[in-house]
Structure formats: C-alpha cells, structure tokens
Image (cartoon, helix red, strand yellow):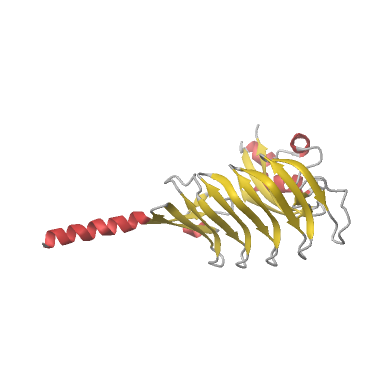
Amino acid sequence: MKKVSSFFILFFSGFLAKAQDTVYYNTNWQTTDAAHASYNQVRVKSDAGWQVTDYYRSSGRVQMTGNFADDSFHVQNGRFTWYDEKGGINHRCDYVNGKLDGVDTLYYPNGRKKTVGVNKDGERDGEWIGYFPNGKMAGKAVYEKGKQVSSAFYNEDGTNNKGIKEFMKNASYPGGPAQLLRYLNKSLKYPDIAVKRKIEGTVVVVFKVSKEGTPSEFKVVQSVDKSLDEEALRVMREMKDWEPSIVGGVYSDSYIKQPVVFRF
C-alpha cells in the first residue's frame, strides 16, 4: 500500500509540474531569464489547451490573457484581451483555430471604444465603426474579405472629413519602405571602432510616431555594440516626419520597431 501511495504522489507531482509553466521575456518579447525580463508568462494546462496570462514585471499587473489550443502556442482559440500598465483594457478580440473570428474592439485609455467591428476567417468583414476619445463617431467603413469597399469619415463637430480616406492605416515613412531603406543606406556611417573590431549585426530601435507624424522616444531594444547602437539612434533621430497611423478614421500615436542592419 505504501508503494502505491508513493507512486501516486510522485505521478501527481509530476503532472502538476507539467500542468503549469512560467516563461520570461525581454522588452523585445524574446525569451530571457527572470533577472532580465520585462514580462513573464504563466501557462496553465486545461482541457481546452493552454490558458496563458502575461504580466508586466514592473507592476505585476496583467498584460494579456488568452488561450492556445496547441502545445507550441501558435494556435489561438477563444477570447484574447490586452491591458495597459494601469490595468485598463486596450484591445479585445476572438480567435477560432488561430484566425481572428468574431468581435474585435480597441479602447482608449479613458475606457471608451476606439474601434469596433467583426472579423471573419482572419479578415475584417462587414461594418466597422471608429470613435473619437469623447465617444463621437469618427468614421465607418465596410469591409469584404479584408478589403475596404466603402467609408465615411467625420470631424468632431459632425461635418464630413474629406482628408481621411482609410479606416485603418499603419504609420509609414514618406515614400514607403523603399525610401526608408535608401535613407538608412545613405545616412549610416560605420563607426571606425566597429570596423577595426569587425563588429556587425542588426540593431533594433523602437520609437514613437505621434499623431502629427513626429518621431520621438527612440530606444534600442536589441543591442549589438555601443558604437553601432549609437549610430543607429543618430540616424533614426535625424529622420524626416512620418505619415501617422490612422485608427478608426482618427490620426493616432503609434510605435514602430525598426531594424538597422550593419554589414561589411
């Protein structure tokens, strides 16, 4: 009887160890150790797959909750919710077998809805509505299989806004990615110390593009060497203004992650 009991305890303990796991991530969402982590992810095994909760290490608050159907954590299933560092919801959407499917809502920091619409089989479908922070409608668009087929946009006083044509648009460098690449290739100067030491690699810089299009808040999230990091920051800081992102028919702040490649 003692042998059976001991075996059961060992088996049960092993099961619990596999049923829950914690993974640590840096600011670039790359796995790291606890000492260098900006986020930690708690994974709990359930009949429906893995329930995942991400936390801000600085505050201990929840950053995201969601469920993955597979052990490799690639197939989202069910509702996912993201939170800001103060605990407010900033995004909530539904997945079915790894594809966006169902209601999708973005929120302002004040808790009001920013955009709301429906995804079908991974793409926007049907009518989507965007709002200003005060709750007034900023625009509406109809999508068919992810493509915007009609739209109408408004100013806060209710008059038509003819300056905006797209419901959703990512911030972009004037002329697009090709022009940005030309700018980087023309402006980068390989630091002498890095040449002598034969140092090369990819520096990743994150920065903010304001709703007016002004780049700021530059930060290296993937470092190679101090000299290369500083040169990447110098070139990024000297960029011209970008075309700002549009969310729900409203010019919005956004954050860009830009790799800067140094190769001989």
Eyeballing the image, is 125 above or below 11? above
Q: Residue furthest front?
A: 126
Q: What residue do we see at 82% from left, 45% from top?
A: 165
| Residue 68 to residue 39: above or below | above
Up-down: is 149 above or below 38? above
- Asked which quadrant contains residue 59, the reply is bottom right
Camera-side residue of 233 and 74:
74
Q: Residue furthest top?
A: 264
Image quadrant in which you'd find residue 43: bottom left
Image quarter hosting the C terminus: top right
Residue at (67, 50) in percent of width and height:
206
Q: Nearer the viewer, residue 2 or 98?
A: 98
- Relative to 54, 192 lies left or right: right
Kindly identify the residue that appears in the image at 33 percent across and 57 percent down: 17
Q: Position of residue 245 (x, y in %)?
A: 76, 49
Percent across and percent down for residue 49 are 42, 51
Is residue 168 visible to the viewer in this orientation of the structure? no
Residue 149 visible (yes or no): yes
Residue at the spot 12% in from the left edge and 62% down from the top edge: 2
Residue 105: x percent and y percent? 65, 56
